[in-house]
């Protein structure tokens, strides 16, 4: 395995300065590093890769469930804590905005902080911490209460912000861990499989909501329309169940090994990383040896000056700007529609309750129709898009898929926006609008929603990979925040949901900007992470430092 490859490389390579012991040791460690990396890049897909995919994927399942369940839960909250006639209560635009935008704002902080910390102290040490935050804050929302000096919506907003911090941390950590363990030829599919769990999470949220609404039907129909206590229980169950998949995954996240690239390039412990590679590719297990002697190497180190020097090169800065703006533009549409799909469905009259219904019966039918509508959108567009990306990501490449996605989305939003009145004029036309809406969901995921997650997790050096992914992801969530604020402030100009068609036209403009930002990124398919880092790899190790005890948590082969 890795150590055998190193021995062959060391014995067959010629060292031009082998008379110098220090130079010889440096040369041997440099060869050992490249041999270990080659072992990871050429490894066959195995059980360890499946484990990484599942452990990281469950996190995204939980993230999506928690983020998008509020799309349905906000309607439930409106019936319980909103204002209006009995059976028609709703949150004010500011209340709805606060509940929906709190999580994306938290995402921004989490992506910056956890992205930076994962590069500073390690992927393993931070992995699981973000999931603990998600579990605690999700449970906190479910048991939020109201008092004389406390507004329940304010409590929920605080908990959702904290949950957003945890979810934000999951983006750079899961992306970087899955990319650094994957082989070059299947890295795109592994990362897509992780991210595709977002679609299953959204679908699960809609299905769980439908089951809860159906289970409470009889109780709900007996409720006083002015109180609707059953709905209060329904949204708490819907949100609280988001704890379950996170709790299941927590143990496995805490026991995932450190990536060999971080051990080599940031901890600068090449010998240990080579042993780890040999170990996880064969047995998939490891143990901690606190007494192991560490021989650290001299290699490029993450500092403020080094960071500025790396990104002062236009080819590196251009890539980061391309990743960041593409994600920003995409999330303007993805979250603008995803967190407001219920409003879109109501605006076009899809599944709206009959006007003859009143009171609790109207509430039941409306909630049921919203759940069914979200299930249709997930099954018809979101989930297929992820898995078509999975099929083509390593053959077509990231850049062509992203470029195609932005172009098609621009066309679809132009049609839906400028043709909105005609597309919603009759029941038959409304079905055509829903088809186009599902098509937009499909090309978001068979397009930039998937690729904007993958490329920043591949295209930067190890010491800045997580930080750079965090910067790009935070740019996306800034777009989500702007989209939510814009949707809340613009949707009702001229009447309830009267401005929705113009919002779709604005989304078309942002999709067009994504076409141009995509031209700034590079293609990453079938390339090693080191080739993509835009740094010379031969001679990457510049010297050898003195031996010292292992850092806590270092791995050694069993």
Image (spheres, rainbow, N blue to C red):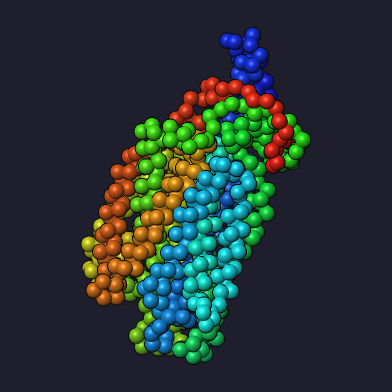
Rendered residue at 74%/41% (across/down): 287
Camera-nearest residue between 20 and 476: 20
| Residue 428 seen anywhere in this rendered image of the structure | no
Pick the quarter of the image with the N terminus.
top right
Image x and y of residue 111, in percent: 49, 51
Q: Is residue 426 above or below residue 443?
A: below
In this figure, what is the number of numbered marks? Answer: 0
Camera-nearest residue between 546 and 518: 546
Pick the quarter of the image with the C terminus.
top right
Camera-nearest residue between 179 and 345: 179
Q: Is residue 509 above or below residue 24?
A: below
| Residue 117 seen anywhere in this rendered image of the structure | yes
Rendered residue at 59%/26% (across/down): 298
Rendered residue at 58%/69% (across/down): 140
Image check: 172 left or right of 421?
Answer: right
Q: Is residue 240 above or below residue 354?
A: above
Image x and y of residue 429, in percent: 28, 69
Q: Is residue 333 above or below residue 391?
A: below
Residue 139: which quarter of the image?
bottom right
Rendered residue at 60%/49% (across/down): 126
Image x and y of residue 332, in percent: 36, 57
Image check: 357 left or right of 427?
Answer: right
Image x and y of residue 160, in percent: 51, 65
């Amino acid at each position: 395995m890795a150590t055998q490859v190193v021995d062959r490389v060391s014995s067959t390579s010629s060292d031009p300065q082998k008379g110098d012991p220090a130079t010889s040791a440096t040369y041997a460690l440099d060869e050992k590093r490249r041999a270990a990396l080659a072992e990871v890049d050429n490894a066959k897909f195995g059980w360890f890769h499946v484990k990484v995919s599942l452990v990281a994927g469950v996190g995204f399942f939980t993230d999506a469930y928690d983020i998008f369940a509020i799309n349905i839960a906000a309607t439930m909250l409106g019936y319980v804590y909103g204002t209006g006639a009995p059976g028609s209560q709703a949150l004010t635009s500011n209340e709805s905005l606060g509940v929906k935008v709190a999580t994306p704002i938290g995402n921004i902080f989490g992506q910056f902080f956890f992205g930076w910390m994962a590069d500073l102290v390690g992927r393993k040490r931070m992995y699981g911490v973000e999931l603990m935050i998600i579990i605690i804050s999700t449970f906190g929302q479910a048991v939020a209460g109201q008092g004389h000096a406390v507004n329940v919506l304010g409590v929920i907003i605080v908990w959702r912000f904290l949950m957003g911090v945890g979810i934000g941390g999951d983006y750079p950590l899961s992306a970087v861990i899955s990319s650094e363990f994957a082989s070059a030829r299947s890295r795109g599919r592994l990362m897509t499989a992780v991210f595709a769990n977002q679609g299953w999470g959204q679908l699960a949220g809609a299905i769980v909501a439908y089951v809860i609404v159906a289970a409470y039907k009889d109780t709900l129909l007996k409720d006083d329309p002015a109180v609707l206590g059953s709905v209060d229980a329904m949204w708490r169950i819907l949100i609280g169940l988001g704890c379950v998949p996170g709790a299941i995954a927590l143990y496995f996240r805490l026991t995932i090994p450190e990536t060999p690239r971080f051990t080599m390039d940031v901890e600068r412990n090449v010998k240990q990383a080579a042993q780890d590679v040999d170990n996880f590719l064969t047995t998939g297990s490891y143990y901690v040896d606190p007494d192991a002697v560490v021989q650290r190497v001299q290699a490029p180190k993450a500092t403020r000056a080094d960071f500025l020097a790396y990104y002062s090169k236009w080819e590196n800065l251009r890539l980061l700007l391309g990743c960041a703006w593409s994600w920003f533009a995409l999330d303007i549409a993805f979250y603008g529609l995803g967190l407001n799909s219920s409003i879109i469905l109501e605006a076009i009259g899809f599944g709206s309750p009959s006007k003859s219904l009143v009171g609790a019966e109207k509430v039941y039918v409306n909630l049921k129709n919203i759940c069914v509508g979200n299930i249709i959108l997930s099954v018809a567009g979101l989930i297929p898009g992820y898995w078509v990306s999975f099929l083509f990501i390593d053959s077509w490449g990231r850049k062509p898929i992203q470029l195609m996605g932005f172009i098609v989305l621009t066309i679809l939003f132009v049609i839906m926006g400028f043709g909105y009145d005609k597309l919603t004029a009759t029941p038959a036309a409304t079905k055509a609008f829903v088809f186009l809406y599902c098509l937009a969901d499909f090309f978001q995921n068979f397009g930039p929603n998937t690729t904007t997650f993958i490329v920043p997790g591949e295209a930067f050096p190890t010491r800045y990979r997580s930080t750079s992914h965090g910067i790009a992801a935070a740019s996306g969530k800034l777009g989500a925040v702007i989209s939510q604020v814009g949707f809340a402030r613009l949707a009702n100009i001229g009447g309830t949901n009267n401005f929705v068609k113009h919002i779709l036209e604005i989304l078309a403009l942002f999709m067009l900007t994504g076409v141009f930002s995509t031209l700034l990124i590079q293609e990453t398919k079938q390339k090693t992470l080191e080739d993509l880092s835009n740094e010379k790899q031969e001679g990457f190790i510049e010297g050898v430092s003195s031996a010292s005890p292992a850092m806590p948590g270092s791995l050694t082969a069993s």
